[in-house]
Image (tube, rainbow, N blue to C red):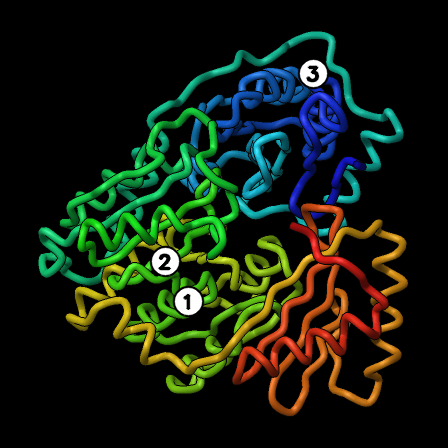
Amino acid sequence: MALMVGISGIRGIVGQTLTPAVALEFAQAYGTMLGGGRIVLGRDTRPSGAMFASAAAAGLVAAGCHVTDIGVVMTPTAGWAIRERQFDGGMIITASHNPGQWNGLKFLDNLGVAPDPQRARQIAEIRSSGSSKHIVSAFGPIECDHEVGQRHMRAVLAACEIDTAALRGTRVVLDSINGAGCLHTPALLEALGCEVIHINGEPTGDFAHRPEPIRDNLGELCAAVREAGAAIGFAQDPDADRLAIVSDKGEYIGEEYTLALAARSVLSRRQGPVAANLSTSRMIDDIAAAHGIEVIRCPVGEAHVARTMLANKCVVGGEGNGGVIDPRVCYVRDSLSAISLVLQFMAATGKSVSQLAGELPAYASVKQKFEMARPDIDNAVKAVTRAFADRPLNDSDGVRIDFEKGWVHFRASNTEPIVRIIAEAETESLAESLAAEVRDAAGIGTECG
């Protein structure tokens, strides 16, 4: 399996495609591209994280950077820290939602935003050409700041616009999957007035279930919400940039609802454009239209969403995978901001999360993934584009086809050697049918597990 290199950084299998030497080389290439400067370095809880953080620190220092090690943190915490202390860039050792045998490096620029595709390619080219900078003197000391997570949490609380006194005593079940969200999410919930039941809450990196926060992986959380009679359940991924929600009925309501509910929360108080990627549910379009607001679509990937938000002064944005960006805090998907916005909406309306979700337009979505090599994916995208040339198409990221009663997005993953098919329609059977049409046009076989 190849090392994955793209706008989401690099990811690989520990000890195989990703080794300390590879981490050092990419970190040194990143430091070279920046021309040195002050860099923040953090990691999630994966057991290999300390090893790769040490290698990355060595590469950054060798390129002339001054490194501040912030230890185990959520990815959005690093983005917030860059803005707080005006760092020149940052790195996080994480493979996000990938399984435990993976790890990776994510890069952030001086705005706390993932590099654009051009700069991401530049990092890879510096590394592959062996042209990284090697300083021979004036090495900067590695400093430490292990309080940044608490400051990030306080910044999210400071951004609250609603008195959450109505939430006092509200029971919440939190599944942090033994990842970076363990450290400061309970304190955020308690500060908002909630009673927290924390499952998988030790920051060991020993993931209690498959780490992607999707329906198939959250049976334990659903059961815990029902047993506790909780008002809501929250599931984070290992680096806590994504959030999925379980309703007061103990039902997984879908990661698409995280951005939808957060956007309703924001737009009920402040007006402005909204950004979302091509794979995000049209719920966001309906919500924005109700407020006379425009949704600006962009390719999949946090970097694309963040830059679209910056360019258009968006008040909220994100992706249908449970990623929410509140630009007042940082330009990284942030589960803490998502939790705060959803709970503020509940406090303001006095409604349960199942009632709020029930008020949203109902669409059925189908998400499939298939193992494919990148050249095969490129050929399949071309085949799908030809097959549906008479339909409205958007080819800025793979190809999205709009049908009369639904849409399908067919694209290569930024983080895994797979192709993704996302279909949405008024019914699940129609979404399945549309996905099958595109799958047949692409000539694809068996879905991944």
**In the figure, residue 436 lies in which quadrant?**
bottom right
Q: Is residue 98 left or right of residue 241?
A: right
Residue, x 24% and y 62% (percent of image)? 248
Name the mark on residue 271: none
Label 2 sits on a secondary structure element that is: strand
**Residue 54 location (% of width, % of height):** 59, 16
Q: Which residue is mark 2?
A: 245
In which quadrant will I find the N terminus? top right
Residue 82 visible in rendering: no
Q: CA distance from mark 2 to mark 3?
A: 43 Å
Q: Quick one: label 2 or label 3, which is nearer the N terminus? A: 3
Numbered disc 1: secondary structure: helix
Q: Residue at x 17, y 51 (%)?
A: 171
Which of the pair 383/185 is nearer the observer? Answer: 383
Gap between marks 1 and 2, in whole Å? Answer: 8 Å
Q: Report if the CB atoms under discs 1 and 2 are less than 8 Å apart.
A: yes
The crowding category of the residue bearing disc 2, from other C-alpha atoms within 10 Å (few below 14, some 14 to 19, many at least 20), is many
Numbered label attached to residue 62:
3
Q: Residue at x 76, y 66 (%)?
A: 398
Q: Name the front one of labels 1 and 3.
A: 1
Dot 1 or dot 3: first in sequence order is: 3
Residue 335 lies left or right of residue 369; in this view the side is left
